[in-house]
Image: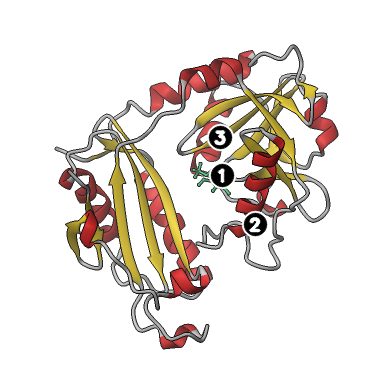
Amino acid sequence: MGLKIYLDGKFVDEEEAKVSVFDHGFLYGDGVFEGIRAYHNSVFRLKDHVDRLYDSAKAVNMEIPVNKEQMSEIILESCRQNDLKDAYIRVVVSRGKGDLGLDPRKCSVPTVVCIASSISIYPEEMYEKGLDVITVPTRRNGPEGVNPRIKSLNYLNNIMAKIEANMAGVPEAILLNQEGYVAECTGDNIFMVKNGILKTPAIHLGLLEGVTRNEVIAIARKEGIDVQETTFTRYDLFVADEVFLTGTAAELIPVVKVDDRVIADGKPGPIFHKLLQQFREIVKEPEALIFK
Ligand code: PMP
């Protein structure tokens, strides 16, 4: 049986969930989105994701045709309609149907889609063994263009980096910013540990302010770990004690090799383990309940 998808005001069968070829999301990547997760009958950090969606929309001058409360209810109802207690949820708001020109004024109303599907969890082995990653030639686009804080439908930059990782036979790519500092990965934020200090690139360097990133920073501070949102280079990663990535889908995932340099002893480190364990405890706490 297919999924029930929310599309512009109603739930329709997956086969009926169709958007016009004149939609500017399709023609130009003109739109914004969110990737959200539900754990044990509760949507994790629903407010943070909805706020980020509306901030992204505001930044690209798009008015979402439902308010935040309605959007939150659409997300919860998408899980209910599909009887999901654990889910990966994708919300997409595109500029809507227009003509072949790129002028958004020709698009009358944004298209709103919400897809809730069962989550395919990464193999536990990846969390135990860690990832081998590389830095790629494609740079993160700078904040002076489409600011990476905007979670826009324009992911071609990240896709180019992913292709470069694929070609190198590794699962993920690190993108540097225009100045050569570490920014983030194609769909995850990045952290490193050196001498007990947890470091992650500062937002102004040009990266998405990940919900998981913020959660990990909060957990670390609560645990008494010194956290710095700062600037670092590939060199700092090579000589780090630990490196890991964070994202809604992956949660926290260790990195054991960067550009062929083995990180520390090549095994996921103690701070990573501690933070992952805490994170997995927190996601169990009931928050935005799907089924009350
Ligand atoms: N960076 C990029 C480019 C992403 O696409 C994502 C995934 N949404 C992240 C970071 C991680 O963000 P979050 O923790 O909110 O999923």
Q: Secondary structure at mark 3?
A: strand
Q: Which residue is mark 2?
A: 157
| Mark 1 residue CB less than 8 A from any atom of ligand 1 | yes
Q: Which residue is mark 3?
A: 246
Snapshot quadrant of residue 254: top right
Q: What is the x, y in percent for residue 20?
A: 34, 74
Q: Which residue is mark 1?
A: 187
Count every numbered label the image shows and give the total: 3
Q: Amino acid at mark 2?
A: Asn
Residue appearing at x 17%, y 43% in the figure: 1
User: Do the residues bearing badges 1 and 3 touch, measured as CB atoms within 8 Å?
Assistant: no
**Eyeballing the image, is 141 above or below 230?**
below
Q: Amino acid at mark 3?
A: Thr
Q: CA distance from mark 2 to mark 1?
A: 11 Å
User: Do the residues bearing badges 2 and 1 touch, measured as CB atoms within 8 Å?
Assistant: no
Q: Amino acid at mark 1?
A: Gly
Q: CA distance from mark 2 to mark 3?
A: 19 Å
Specify whether residue 201 is in view: no
**Eyeballing the image, is 223 above or below 81?**
above
* Closer-to-camera residue (215/100): 100
* Closer-to-camera residue (72/250): 250
| Mark 3 residue CB less than 8 A from any atom of ligand 1 | yes
